Amino acid sequence: MENKFPIRQVMDGEGNLTDSSYHLTEELIKEMYTKMLRARTLDKKSVNLQRQGRIGTYAPFEGQEAAQVGSASALGEGDWMFPTYRDHAATLTFGHSVSTIMLYWKGRVEGCVPPDGKNIFPPAVPIATQLPHATGAALAEKRKGTDRVAIAYFGDGATSEGDFHEGLNFASVFKAPVVFFNQNNGYAISVPIEKQMNSKTIAQKGLAYDMNSVRVDGNDVFAVYFETQKAIEKARRGEGPTLIEAVTWRYGAHTTADDPTKYRDQELSLEKRNQIDPLLRLERYMEKQGMWDAAWKEQMLKQCDEEIEKAVGEMENYPEPDVNDIFDHVFKEPVWPLERQKEAYLSQKRGETV
């Protein structure tokens, strides 16, 4: 199966083009680099904030920047994005502000609200539930006669869930304009992929649904961008869905509550950082093309740091949440169990004996 689904690549780990058939402009190259640098800076800052107790448990994505930035950059205005709890590089690229993402990790409902005109669903914490949602949104756009598409992000573990198969089956039957974007990190939390499935690839799972499927080097931002662009254009033409398997590697833990040293070889992770890192390989390519130097990177980093520090300040100075929201927006009309819980909580808060 691996021979039937070869990994598509445009640029190797040393920054050499392996496929020169694509048109790469300096504007596109620098745009991809700065978006990935911005995302990585946010990721590192968020891990530090969690360790300092300033946000809650956090899901890092360092190493997956090319997969998320490259795919999100291929979307157009009005398209739909259905992320997981780890795809904030994608949502950032597609239009979420840094402060909105910070509010989400602070546990604020405001962190789920996209900017006006941006169709970004709240991050899906239950595994794979967003795939049928993406299919539904895509079908709705098809029925309305638009050319809008949806993209659903998910990890390798999600392909073992029923929602994965239901989403792909519906999309295939009704030719929904949706792209299923898998980031194959090789682990479903602590379970390596070879212990999770007998399939040699995730792309081959699309065969059961007669769905166009491709594997791509998930650390090659150009390959991800162009393959996602092809899938989106195909969907816009009414030719149905595509399953993309982006083979990647995340350096850190599943979340900040996890210890990857218990189940993963950290020396291997270090080797991969030096060999296939998405930013490093693009730096190597840009340096060979005379587009990159350390001073320019420092300038970009400074801009990213300033933006993120401002967003952190906005998050920490945000008005206190209204506790009534927890109880008042579950049902249209109040129900007695919630009313009783609300009164008990407020009484406890006032220091009264319940």
Image (cartoon, grey):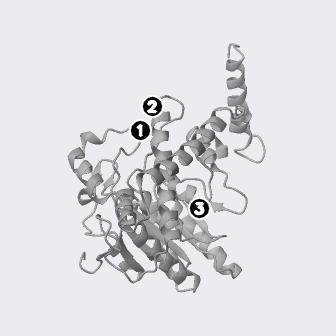
Residue 125 rendering spot, x and y as whole percentages: 50, 50
Q: Distance between the residues labelled 2 and 1?
A: 8 Å
Q: Is residue 326 left or right of residue 253?
A: right
**Looking at the rendered structure, which numbered label has been put on residue 51?**
2
**Looking at the rendered structure, which numbered label has been put on residue 94?**
3
Indicate which disc, 1 or 3, sits on the residue closer to the N terminus.
3
In front of the other: 319 or 301: 301
Q: In this view, does 173 lie to the left or right of 107?
A: left
Residue identifier under label 1: 256
Please determine whether, in this image, residue 258 is positioned above or below residue 93: above
In front of the other: 7 or 311: 311
Residue 338 rendering spot, x and y as whole percentages: 69, 35
Q: Which amino acid does label 3 sit on?
A: Phe
Q: What residue type is labelled 2?
A: Arg
In which quadrant is the N terminus drawn?
bottom left
Dividing the picture into quadrants, the one containing residue 283 is: bottom left
**Circles 1 and 3: CB atoms closer than 8 Å:** no
Q: Residues within 10 Å of mark 2 (few under 14, many from 20)?
A: some
- Front of the two marks 2 and 1: 2
